[in-house]
Structure formats: structure tokens, C-alpha cells
Amino acid sequence: MVTNFWRTVVLALLVVMGFSNKVPAADNGKLVVELNKFEGIESACRAFFLFRNGTRHSFSAFELSLAVLNGKGVIERLLTLEAAPIPAERTTLKLFEIPDTQCGQIGEIILHDIAKCDAPDSQSLQCYDMIELRSLANAPLVK
């Protein structure tokens, strides 16, 4: 009888712990910008970016200034990407075309500047500090 009681208590605790893991994660304060992959298209390279917003801020304006370098480290072109809207605590996919560029020629992409970073629910955001960059593509994405 005692064994059944403790077995029930342990099972109840495991069930409660299982449900507690399903609660959404707390604000980690980071907006992860991930260069996920490249895809060659006619006279351009399509870049797939994931914006993993781990903040509680919804961005109504989010504009990145990027420098695209070739394999020798020479700047091939500058791009301005408007990624908004970016909802709070969500992952969104954005596709951008890099004109007159073959994907295999891209050696690195540098985040040069954050031209716009507006979240109506926040007075003062340190956008550059909250950005974390990642790349799963053949070229790194760096600050």
C-alpha cells in the first residue's frame, strides 16, 4: 500500500515537471539573426534568413546594413535589408536576393550597421547589443 502511494506521488511529480517544461521560455534578451542557406537563382543569390526573436519586443522597423565580401575578403556590395515586422517571441523567415552575385562567390557577410530598430513597446533598445549572429550557410555572418 505504501509502495503504491509513493509510486503515485512520483508519477504526479513527473507529470507536473513535464508540464512545466512546456511553459514558454523567459525573455533571453537576444534576437538571433541566422543566415540559414543560399540558393542560386538567375543572376542572383537568394539568402534565407531566420530571425529568432527571444525578446518580448515586436519590431515594427528593423533594417540591417550588410557588406558582402568575396572569398578574398574584398567588399563586393553593400545591402540594406528591411526585415520588419518581427513579432515578439517568434521565429520568422525572410528571403533576400543579392543581385549580380553567385552564391559560391560569397566569402563572408558583415553586419555593418543597424539602420532602424523600432519596437513601439520599448523606449530605448540597445539593438546592436541584443543581436546574436549565426550562419548555417557556406559563408559566416559576423559583426
Image: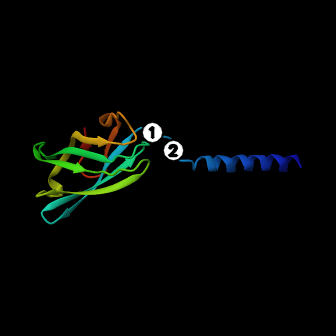
Residue 55 lies left or right of residue 71; in this view the side is: right
Taking the spot 77% from the left edge, 46% from the top edge, the residue there is 9
Q: Residues within 10 Å of mark 2 (few under 14, many from 20)?
A: few
- Looking at the rendered structure, which numbered label has been put on residue 72? none
**Residue 19 % position (x, y):** 63, 50
Side of 18 relative to 67 (left or right)? right
67 or 105, which lies in front?
67
Quadrant in the picture for the C terminus: top left
User: Can you give x and y, in whole percent of width and height, for residue 35 in the image?
Assistant: 29, 50
Q: Which mark is residue 28?
A: 1
Q: Determine the secondary structure under disc 2.
A: loop
User: Residue 82: x and y, percent?
Assistant: 24, 50
Question: Circle 2 is placed at which residue position?
Answer: 25
Query: At x 58% / y 47%, what residue is drawn?
Result: 21
Task: Give the structural element (helix, strand or loop) at label 1.
Answer: loop
Contact check, label 1 and label 2, Cβ < 8 Å = yes
The chosen color scheme is: rainbow
Left or right: 21, with 5 as reference point:
left
Name the residue: 38% across, 38% down. 122
Q: CA distance from mark 1 to mark 2?
A: 8 Å
User: In front here: 133 or 125?
Assistant: 125
Residue type for callout 2: Ala
Eyeballing the image, is 73 above or below 103?
above
